[in-house]
Amino acid sequence: MSEHVRVRFAPSPTGYLHVGGARTALFNWLYARKTGGKFILRIEDTDVERSTQEAVDGLLRDMKWLGLTWDEGPEVGGPHGPYFQSQRLEIYHRYARQLVEKGAAYPCFCSEEELEAKRMKAEEEHRSVHYDGTCRRLSKEEVDRRIAAGEPHVIRVKVPEKDYILDDLVRGKVEWKAETLGDFIILRSSGMPVYNFCVVADDADMQISHVVRAEEHLTNTHRQLILYEALGIKPPVFAHASLILGEDKTKLSKRHGATSVGQYAEDGFLREAMINFLALLGWNEGTDREIYSVEELKERFSLERISKSPGVFDHAKLTWMNGQHLRALPVDQLLPMVEPLLKKAMPEETRLQNPEILRKLVELIQIKMNVLNDAVDVARSFLQAGEPENEEAAAMVATEKSQKLFAALADEFSRCEWVRDGYNAAIKAAGKIAEAKGKDLFMPIRVKITGTCHGPDLVGILDVLGRDETLKRLK
Ligand code: GLU
């Protein structure tokens, strides 16, 4: 069965890739990768007024950044293309013709004015305001004659008088009553197909096996089930994931902070952390585990464990998770990500030009970082040290004992071998001379050399600064 899994992400290119959309894409991608199925990217751009090329470019860029590679879709093509709805009009017309030919849909010539009048009358008489089916009853001869005469018409699907039940993988049984819909339009008089019809025609044509999407599309599923039935095609399996909420439990919006994937990329978040975070925003294995690699998610993900309750987008948790992933990266991987940031922020810093020092620096600051952009602040805190950061720090270096310590240390440092064992021994010796131990020993030295009471490992800092710079700062 697994080779038949075909899932899709079908964004409308009317804005940036939202974290909610990215989660939908991720669930589909994980399911395809887990089952060895295919992941298809389809651009739903029939709303020409709101769709832009810029949005398409941004979507593809952000999908690539996340590593959500697609097997069929824009740029890569595939056997069921084109993958832009705006280029598939012929396909929609073909499906509409099929429906008319088999009597499951019909042309409707009722004008807007007639329909409006009928709606008003129905409302007055407290009847259902659905389309009354006038053109359902036209003879074939009349239909042919009016079409030949060029009368404008839409195509409507015949909605059967029956309830529809969806067995959703996440939400369970969802039921729609027969009387809630009239014969609805699938093709407008302009020849433009309506949204739900495009989705069904495409999902059918692209042989989609599972539709995994957000809860907001659940109501569309009623019409879509009717269309599958009309076409005589078995509908895919549906799984509607819950909404994503902000921390105040209202629908996630810009008010809650960044909601675009691109913004997180720019703010120095890692792809691995973003994927981990989004995966757990509405899916879990039934354990408390929070940190997963992408590979582990690919193995463990299942549609059945998508959660029914809404996920809460917790920024602090995302930052924490990013720190976990970032600190677990091999230095070789982190270095090329951090190097351009550092060089851009401190172009005058010649130490950054030395590959050996740069590597030591990255090793040193890694444990203090949560996001990539933290690298600059952490590195700057000791590379470009200034005066003590506050009164407490200033007082610490001003004591007689500290002065004695710095003098002794400068002496020891100027003679010792400039390796870790060497300066550790020098610090110890200077401590003896100045009678300073523990915190009294290390804190003043740290403040004297870096200006702050915090920061990475002192010995590591000495590695990066080198002997000359250290001595200059001590004196
Ligand atoms: N184009 C729709 C959207 O961007 C998705 C439709 C679907 O997944 O069925 O929300």
Image (tube, rainbow, N blue to C red):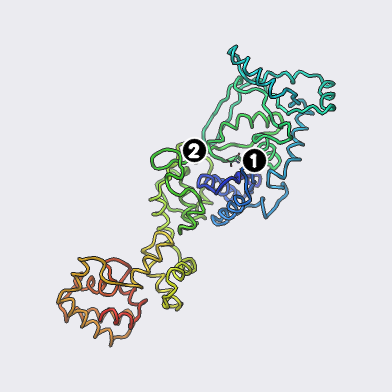
387 left or right, relative to 213: left
Quarter of the image for residue 363 reads bottom left
Question: Depth-wise, is mark 1 or mark 2 nearer the camera?
Answer: 1
Quadrant in the picture for the N terminus: top right
Residue in the picture at 71% in, 29% down: 230
Q: Vertical placement of 441 versus 44: above or below?
A: below
At label 2, which amino acid type do we have?
Answer: Ser
Q: Residues within 10 Å of mark 1 (few under 14, many from 20)?
A: some
Viewer-closest of 239 and 256: 256
Regarding mark 1 in the picture, which secondary structure is present there? loop
Place of residue 319 in the rendered image (x, y in percent of width and height, measured from the top left): 40, 54
Place of residue 173 in the rendered image (x, y in percent of width and height, measured from the top left): 54, 29
> For the view shown, which residue lies furthest in the front direction?
113
Viewer-closest of 24 and 405: 405
Q: Vertical placement of 189 versus 82: above or below?
A: above
Q: Residue 47 shows which numbered tag?
A: 1
109 left or right, relative to 57: right
Q: Residues within 10 Å of mark 2 (few under 14, many from 20)?
A: many
Whether residue 37 is visible here, answered yes or no, is no
Which of the marked residues, 1 or 2, is nearer the chain's N terminus? Answer: 1
Q: Vertical placement of 250 versus 388: above or below?
A: above
Q: Residue 242 shows which numbered tag?
A: 2
Q: Distance of mark 1 from mark 2, alpha carbons?
A: 25 Å
Whether residue 464 is visible here, answered yes or no, is yes
At label 1, which amino acid type do we have?
Answer: Asp
